[in-house]
Image (tube, rainbow, N blue to C red):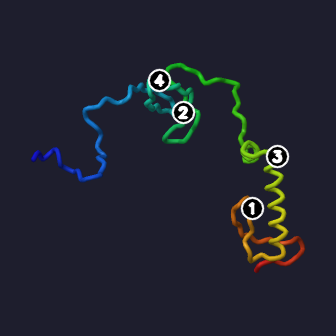
């Protein structure tokens, strides 16, 4: 029996070693310059769209620009995607109204009986509610 054919293998196992006789996907290095004075290289696929800016691995700065002279697009502001924007993208106005109604019913129910978890959007939640000017409900 050949030793290299069975070495490190058992039935159903997966080798974590790279295949030595296969070619990797074609790549190209792109160099970026950090504003704090150093440069680093990132590998991209040959057919990938190359970004004009990249985050520095050392400092976390997102303003590292390419050293080949490609300038970032100026004047393009990304829309701020707040929680509210994401929420309104995922739900229709009818679904939001229904969720609001469920939440108000749950809050009202929680005022009366805090020990029981409430259902909001099909999930169970438990929380404490303290009315204004009153004592803490539910302990």
Task: Tell me which numbered mark, 1 or 4, is placed earlier along the sequence.
Answer: 4
Against 62, residue 100 (above or below) is: below
Image-based side of 100 in relation to 123, left or right: right
Q: Residue at x 24, y 53 (%)?
A: 10
Q: Nearer the viewer, residue 18 or 139?
A: 18
Give the distance between the C-alpha atoms of the residues marked 4 and 3, in whole angstroms.
Answer: 41 Å
Q: Nearer the viewer, residue 98 or 72?
A: 98
- Residue that label 4 marks: 47
- Residue that label 3 marks: 93
The nearer-to-camera label among 1 and 2 is 1
Secondary structure found at label 3: helix
- Residue that label 2 marks: 54
Q: Residue at x 59, y 21 (%)?
A: 71
Residue 120 disc label: 1
Q: Residue at x 82, y 46 (%)?
A: 93
Residue 46: name its quadrant.
top left
Give the distance between the C-alpha atoms of the residues marked 4 and 2, in whole angstroms.
Answer: 18 Å
Give the distance between the C-alpha atoms of the residues marked 1 and 4, in whole angstroms.
Answer: 46 Å
Q: Nearer the viewer, residue 39 or 138?
A: 138
């Amino acid at each position: 029996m050949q030793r290299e054919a069975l070495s490190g293998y058992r039935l159903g196992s997966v080798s974590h070693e790279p295949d030595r006789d296969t070619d990797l996907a074609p790549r190209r290095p792109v160099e970026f310059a950090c504003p704090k004075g150093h440069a680093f290289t990132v590998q991209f696929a040959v057919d990938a769209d190359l970004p004009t800016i990249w985050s520095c691995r050392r400092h976390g700065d997102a303003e590292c620009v390419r050293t080949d002279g490609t300038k970032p697009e100026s004047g393009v502001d990304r829309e701020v995607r707040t929680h509210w924007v994401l929420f309104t993208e995922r739900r229709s106005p009818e679904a939001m109204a229904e969720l609001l109604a469920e939440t108000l019913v749950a809050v009202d129910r929680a005022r009366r009986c805090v020990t029981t978890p409430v259902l909001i959007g099909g999930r169970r939640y438990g929380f404490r509610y303290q009315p204004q000017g009153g004592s803490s409900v539910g302990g």
